Image (cartoon, grey):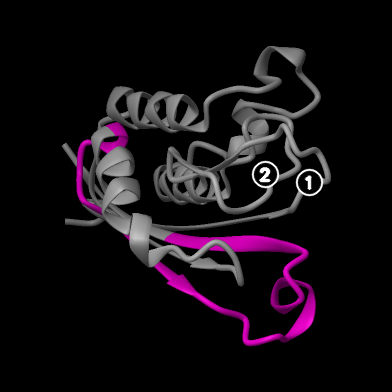
């Protein structure tokens, strides 16, 4: 069946903030051992990448179109809420999520100790399994110098 399944890819990157009061949120989980990320919303690059992967797969635009950083309405927004909103849009368009997978590239914080929490939060928002893995940039480039982090995500959706 043509169009019965689709794959989408998402990407997001943010630099670390100098604001010591800004929390680091990744996959809906607060990390205490690293600086927060610069961003209009809560800066959750993991939730942003998954959101973009899902929207891309369904042909529904991207996170910047739906939740623009030029709109004060989204200032400080909970990115897990934005992800859930995107999933609702997929549902309205007749799509369901099969699964998503994301890779976080960062020197800090370590992802593995919090992976299960991140997967649980993301999976609950998506209504399907979301897997997370952390990788290091091995001292290469801005990511390797610890200036920020990046996340890539892929999602599989199916026509309902």
Quadrant of the snapshot with the N terminus: bottom left
> At x 81% / y 24%, what residue is drawn?
70
Q: Nearer the viewer, residue 154 or 17?
A: 17
Within 10 angstroms of label 2, few (less than 14), some, or many (20 or more) residues?
many
Q: Nearer the viewer, residue 160 or 139?
A: 139
Marks 1 and 2, how far apart in space?
5 Å
Look at the image and say whether residue 38 sits in the magenta stretch: no
Q: What's the magenta region?
A: 125-153
Dot 1: element: loop
Q: Are marks 1 and 2 in contact (CB under 8 Å)?
A: yes
Dot placed on the residue nearer the N-terminal end, 1 or 2: 1
Q: Is residue 91 left or right of residue 150?
A: left
Q: Is residue 121 left or right of residue 142?
A: left
Dot 2: element: loop
- Residue 43: percent from the left, percent from the top? 64, 39
Circle 2 is placed at which residue position?
36
Q: Nearer the viewer, residue 58 or 16?
A: 16
Look at the image and say whether residue 126 sits in the magenta stretch: yes
> At x 43% / y 45%, what residue is drawn?
27
Q: Is residue 83 left or right of residue 41?
A: left
> At x 59% / y 37%, what residue is drawn?
63
Task: Spot the residue most to the top.
Answer: 73
> At x 53% / y 25%, what residue is drawn?
78
Image position of 137 with respect to 151: above or below:
below
Q: In this figure, what is the number of numbered marks? A: 2
Image position of 23 with respect to 145: above or below:
above
Image position of 103 with respect to 35: above or below:
below
Circle 1 is placed at which residue position?
17
- Residue 35: percent from the left, percent from the top? 68, 49
Residue 37 is drawn in which quadrant? top right
Quadrant of the snapshot with the C terminus: top left
């Amino acid at each position: 069946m043509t169009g019965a399944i689709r794959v989408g890819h998402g990407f997001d990157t943010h630099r670390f903030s100098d604001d010591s009061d800004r929390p680091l949120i990744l996959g809906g989980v607060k990390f205490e051992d690293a600086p927060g990320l610069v961003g209009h919303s809560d800066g959750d690059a993991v939730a942003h990448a998954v959101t973009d992967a899902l929207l891309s797969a369904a042909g529904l635009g991207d996170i910047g179109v739906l939740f623009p950083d030029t709109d004060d309405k989204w200032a400080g927004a909970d990115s897990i809420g934005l992800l859930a909103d995107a999933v609702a849009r997929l549902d309205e368009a007749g799509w369901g999520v099969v699964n998503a997978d994301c890779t976080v590239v960062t020197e800090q914080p370590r992802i593995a100790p919090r992976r299960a929490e991140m997967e649980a939060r993301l999976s609950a928002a998506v209504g399907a399994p979301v897997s997370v893995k952390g990788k290091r940039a091995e001292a290469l480039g801005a990511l390797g110098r610890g200036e920020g982090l990046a996340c890539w995500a892929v999602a599989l959706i199916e026509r309902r």
